Structure formats: C-alpha cells, structure tokens
Image (cartoon, grey):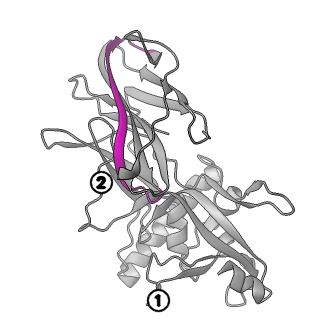
Amino acid sequence: MCSVLRCLGIPTRIVTGFAWAQDTAGSLWVEEHHDETGALLPRRDDIAGASVWAFHAWTECWMARSDLPPGYGGWQALDALPQEKSQGPSCCGPAPVQAIKEGNVELPYDVPYLFAAVNAKTSVWVHGADGSCQRAASSPKYVGNNLSTKGVGSERCEDITQHYKHPEDSAQEREVLENTCRKLQELKLLEGSGIETAPSPEGDAPLLCVFIQAESSVLLGQDVHFSVTVCNRSAEARAVQLVLGAQALQYNGAAQAQLWKEEFHFTLKDNHGESMQHRDGAPSARPSLAWRDPGAALGGQGLSYCLRATRHRDGAPSIRPSLAWR
C-alpha cells in the first residue's frame, strides 16, 4: 500500500506500533488468561476475541479531508491487513490521526477500531488447577505506548506516540477515554454494532503486588538480566509464593512453550518490599535468565520472550493474585 500511494504522489510512511490490540471490534478491553505459573494459556480456535500482538505495522498518508470538519486533514491511518469489516470490505481507514487522538469515533472511517488498538486495556485472569478463575491485580497499561516511524533523513526511529494519544495517566487522556466510552456506547445503541466499552478499573490498590524490571532491548543470543520486586502494602506479614517464568510468544501473541520456571516461598514483612533472585537458594537482587534456543519445535516463526512473575494468595480472602510481565 505504501508503494502504491507513493507512486500516486501521495506522501506516505509506515508506522509500527509495539503492543497492539487486535480484533477488538471497537472494544476497549482485552482479556488474557494465565495458569498459576503465569504462563499465557493458548486461545481456543473456536472462540474469537481480541488479543495483544507484539507489534503491528500500518500506513499513514497525508491528504486533505474535505468530507470532514476543519482540522482533520493531514496524516490519515490506513491498515491493509484485514481485521475488521468496514461496511462490507475487510479494510481499515482512512482514519484521521487527530480524530484517533481526540477519540472522535463518530468520524469516518473506522476510527473506533484504531482508537481501541492503541488505547485498549488488559484484564488478566488466573486459572487454578481446581478449575477456579480469578481476576489478577496487574497493570492494564501496556498497549500502544510505543508508536514509531522512520525518521526523515535518518535510519533511526521517530517516536510519534504523541500523535495518537495523550500522555499516559494525564488529565487529557482520562477525559478522552471517558468521552470516548460514552460515544462508543451511543454507537452501540444506535447501530447495534456490538461495540463494548472498558469496565471501570478496580479502585482498591492490591495489598500484595509484584514488579519486573528488565532491559528494553536484548540481542539474540544474549542472557536476559532482570529484577523482580515484591511489595507488601498491608499491616501484617504475608506468606508469599512467587513463581517466575519465561515463555516464547509469536508476534500475534499466540502462546508457545514455557522455557523456564522457578518458584520461591518466603514471608514478607508488613509495609515492606523486597527484590528477588535465586542465589544459593536464597533471595537476592538481580536474576539472570540464560539464553535458550526455543528450537525447531516452535515452527521457525519470529518469537519473543515474555518474562512473567506471579504472586499467589496466602489464604487471606482480601488478597488477589498479582501478575507482572516484560
């Protein structure tokens, strides 16, 4: 598409989004399901639903939009990958980038799907061996936080995330999300489109939580160094079961083999946090995951590693599972 548009004399560029919500049907919520070790469970083929892709590329072209109110010309997003049916054809756009940022989902074309792709939040569920399923405390904000294109006259990436969305957790972002949720609900009622809005986030902060820090970029074949911090925000000591794991994922978020898993049991004092690694059987400060070739059994497709840490309940009814990943 980029080559065709450039041949027609239309200024065009390729944009790549890292962590992209796919097949959302305009919903602002993506569900992910994990087992008790933190491993992402494979999606069932007979159940359609949204998923988070590691990356996705689409096209921007610069054009006037005389069919829209003033201010919505300029960069328009087009996606040649069939993902949502737009009044029949499987295509997407052109959608004004400014409309995506402002949440004006009533403007043509296909703004709701592109808005959801870069603004959707994730809801994580942990499935127990006994068949139970419980929503985990986890960060919902990792979709659409890195959108980039090739810099003009340079081989470096240019970050254009600010063209598509307001800064994370800013007052402008909250206002846009609230207004867009109302508009999506109106579109659902008026058109019967089945568009769903995001549920309200749970207000209470988790009493036990886990965080992972790791390098943002690791070369193929290198070891992965990371740190895991567990925090107890309650007024009493807690018995903690911490499971660390690494899993291979395809670019479309499809779960592959779990490559590594390690488990820790310890007691965490009240209002206390601790960084963990395994060293001579004792907690320490910085784990290192040695490189492991995922092997031909995974199909030879492009893969990425996903590090996850799962903190399980210690029996207290007020404590939910907590899950973090990088």
- Tell me if mark 1 has few (under 14), some (14-19) or many (20+) residues whose alpha carbon lies within 10 angstroms of its own: few
Q: Disc 1 on helix, strand or loop?
A: loop
Q: Is residue 219 visible?
A: yes
Q: Quadrant of residue 78?
A: bottom right
> 312 or 57, which lies in front?
57
Task: Give the residue at x 78% y 54%.
Answer: 156
Q: Is there CB contact under 8 Å for labels 1 and 2? A: no
Give the residue drawn at x 37%, y 38%.
259
Amino acid, disc 1:
Pro
Which residues make up the magenta segment? Answer: 251-272
Mark 1 or mark 2, earlier in chain: 2
In this rendering, the answer to whether 279 lies above or below 299 is: above
The amino acid type, in three-letter code, at marker 2 is: Pro
Q: Looking at the picture, how far across and down is residue 207, in whole percent?
A: 37, 26
Residue 63 on image: x %, y %: 75, 83
Q: Which residue is mark 1?
A: 89
Please give the residue where the numbered disc 2 appears in the rendered image: 42
Could you tell me how far apart the alpha carbons at marks 1 and 2 are, in whole angstroms? 29 Å
Which image quarter: residue 99?
bottom right
> Where on the picture, by quarter, is residue 144?
bottom right
- Residue 308 placement, left or right of 75: left
Q: In the rendered image of this protein, does residue 311 appear above or below residue 305?
A: above
Looking at the picture, tell me which residue is in the foreground, 38 or 104: 38
The reply to whether the magenta stretch includes residue 177 is no
Q: Is residue 198 visible?
A: no
Residue 170's x, y, as percent?
A: 63, 48
Relative placement, left or right, of 312 versus 123 is left
Q: Residue at x 66, y 65 (%)?
A: 15
